[in-house]
Image (spheres, rainbow, N blue to C red):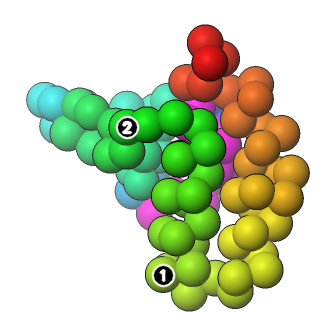
């Protein structure tokens, strides 16, 4: 089992669902429930678009704008996603 989501880098232990879901309803341990549901990614697009999407989602989820920005644009997610399997080909 992965320690973090291979799409967004979120620690899997922070995912209340414990992972994404495959098309057949089984658990997918490689991606979190925010990124992957019912056998497909919940967001399709480029990495910059994905960061913007993460930022908006975190602010809507109650995170402060600064923290959300720091996570999505300020280096944390940027550094992680550069090496995460989903984005390696970009
Ligand atoms: Zn994720």
Instruction: Name the outermost residue toward the left.
Output: 24
The disc label shown at residue 60, or none: 1
Residue 78 image-quadrant placement: top right
The N terminus lies in which quarter of the figure?
top right
Q: In the image, is residue 70 above or below residue 49? A: below
Q: Is residue 72 visible?
A: yes
Q: State the residue in front, 60 or 49.
A: 49
Magenta residues?
A: 4-16
On screen, residue 19 versus residue 82, left or right, reads: left
Q: State the residue in front, 31 or 57.
A: 57
The disc label shown at residue 25, or none: none
Going 23% across and 31% down the picture, which residue do you hit? 39
The C terminus lies in which quarter of the figure?
top right
The Cα atoms of the two marked residues, 2 and 1, are separated by 19 Å
Mark before the other along the chain sequence, 2 or 1: 2
Q: For the residue labelled by badge 1, is the local secondary structure a helix, a strand or a loop? A: helix
Instruction: Name the outermost residue toward the top.
Output: 89
Mark 1, ligand 1, within 8 Å: the answer is no
Image coords of residue 60 (percent x, y): 48, 81
Image coords of residue 12 (percent x, y): 59, 48
**Is disc 2 surrounded by few (<14), some (14 to 19) or many (20+) residues within 10 Å?**
few
Going 53% across and 47% down the picture, which residue do you hit? 49
Q: Which residue is mark 2?
A: 44
Going 60% across and 24% down the picture, which residue do you hit? 87
Mark 2, ligand 1, within 8 Å: the answer is no
Task: Tell me whether circle 2 and circle 1 mark residues in contact (CB < 8 Å).
Answer: no
Magenta span includes 32:
no
On screen, residue 38 versus residue 69, left or right, reads: left
On screen, residue 21 versus residue 55, left or right, reads: left
In terms of secondary structure, what is the magenta stretch mainly? Answer: loop
Going 83% across and 39% down the picture, which residue do you hit? 79
Q: For the residue labelled by badge 2, is the local secondary structure a helix, a strand or a loop? A: loop
């Amino acid at each position: 089992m992965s320690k973090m989501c291979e799409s967004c880098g979120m620690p899997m232990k922070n995912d209340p669902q414990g992972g994404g879901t495959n098309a057949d309803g089984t658990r997918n341990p490689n991606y979190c429930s925010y990124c992957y549901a019912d056998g497909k990614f919940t967001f399709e697009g480029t990495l910059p678009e994905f960061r913007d999407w993460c930022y908006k989602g975190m602010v809507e989820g109650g995170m402060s704008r600064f923290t959300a920005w720091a996570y999505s644009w300020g280096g944390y997610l940027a550094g992680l996603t550069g090496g995460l399997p989903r984005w390696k080909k970009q």
